[in-house]
Amino acid sequence: MRIGLGLQPGQELVLTAPTDALPLVRLITAHAYKAGAKLVTTFYSDDAATLARYQNAPDESFDYAPAWYHDAIATAFKSGAARMGVTGANPALLAQQDPAKVSRANVAASKASKPAMELITRHEINWTIVAAATPAWAKLVFPDDPEPAALSKLWDAIFFASRITSDDPVAQWKQHGENLKRRVDFLNGRRYHSLRFYTPDGATDLTVGLADQHLWAGGGTTAGNGVYCQPNIPTEECFTTPHKDRVNGFVTASKPLSHQGTLIENIRCEFKDGKIVKATATAGEEAINKLISTDEGARKLGEVALVPHNSPIAQGGILFWNTLFDENAASHIALGQAYSTCLIGGEKMSNEELAKLGANESLIHVDWMIGGPTMNVDGLAEDGTAEPLMRAGDWV
């Protein structure tokens, strides 16, 4: 509550979580009330119920999302509620389901949740996401272990990745935040025009233009309501807003992407003038192409992030099949919506003003990993002069 969410006395808390995370949610709820929460309201998702929809619901069901529910969440945020998401659902839940239905359901949910998500992407409220180890997720990460052992290993991995294994995790997080801030300040001082990502094997050679008046961010942030929070736990990234029309080259994913229950492996995308012109994958190719067809902005980038290969998550060597963790093991890019707070004065700008500076707009925001132990990154000035930022995956 103190270092992650920053929950304030008298503030409401809206929680979302899978049913398997009930024990953790009960602990969070108790501590929220001890911190002075006015009311904690939790919305649960259930893997079995979600799967039942895809197996039994009429076809028209997949073009529908309950606007009343998402409007209520947006109303809570506008009224000052904080938001915490607990992740832990089975990442492979929908792997065998019709990708077209998955895509349609995602589009409907994205449209319905847009009013609430805009408050998140503009950082109007204090919010955070944390993880709970669950049996299905644990067996995916540690398939060779019995379920109890797999669950124990996943909890240990979550604690290690989340930097909460020391005697004073709060002090450790404060120090980690200061380290990220120093890196962010350096990047903001350089004012690079673009970044070039490339690997010795030729799998990636991508130039990502940066939005005009871009701002780098990382670690904690002060939300629009004046509350300091850590939006993601864990976090290892320094990130900013790319220019939606200035991305060129090709890039190969360094880790699989788990998206809405579908596992997408070995993604390779070609970009021209900001837009994906070709996307392939060895598994889940239909899903990635459905994803980038969500709307006009889904083929463009809304985020670029630098993550060193010496981060705890990368060094742990575990594939979590969960973007909250895997994106913090490697430099990454995100398809879709840009964060307005990663532009100077962006939180006060209209969508039209943001677009003029290069910020992308979309119903989606999906991170996927491109960094690793062979990734090199250069910062490029407007005249093309290159300065090394990363070599073999780590800061120079």
Image (cartoon, rainbow, N blue to C red):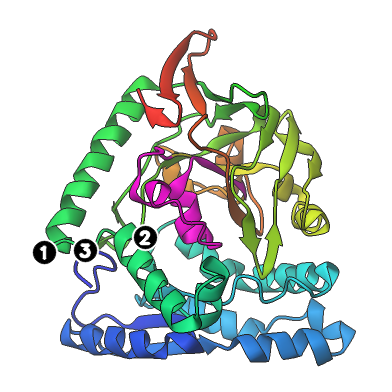
CB contact under 8 Å: marks 3 and 1: no
- Residue at 50% across / 21% down in the picture? 193
- Above or below: residue 66 compared with residue 107: below
Q: Where is residue 24 in the image (x, y as percent from the top left)?
A: 34, 84
Amino acid type indicated by mark 1: Asp
Q: What kind of element bears circle 3? A: loop
**Horizontal side of residue 292 vs 135, given as left or right:** right
Q: Mark 2 points at which residue?
A: 231
Q: Does the magenta stretch include residue 328?
A: yes
Q: At which x and y percent is residue 329? A: 45, 48
Q: In which quarter of the image is the C terminus?
A: top left
Q: Quadrant of residue 27?
A: bottom left
User: Which of pointers 3 and 2 lies earlier in the amino acid sequence?
Assistant: 3
Circle 2 SS class: loop
Query: Which part of the image, by quadrant, shows the N terminus?
Result: bottom left
Stretch of the chain drawn in magenta: 307-335
Q: What residue type is labelled 3?
A: Thr
Spatial CA distance of label 1 from label 2 is 23 Å
| Mark 3 and mark 2 residues within 8 Å of each other at the beta carbon | no
User: How many marks on residues?
Assistant: 3
- Residue 144 versus residue 247: which sits nearer the camera? 144
Q: In this view, does 287 lie to the left or right of 396?
A: right
User: Which comes sooner in the sequence, label 1 or label 2?
Assistant: 1
Image-quadrant location for residue 115: bottom right
For the residue pair 184 and 377, the one nearer the viewer reads as 377
Find disc 1 in the rendering and name its residue: 167
Name the residue that disc number 3 marks.
Answer: 165
Residue 208, position in %: x, y?
A: 59, 29
**Secondary structure state at the residue bearing disc 1:** loop
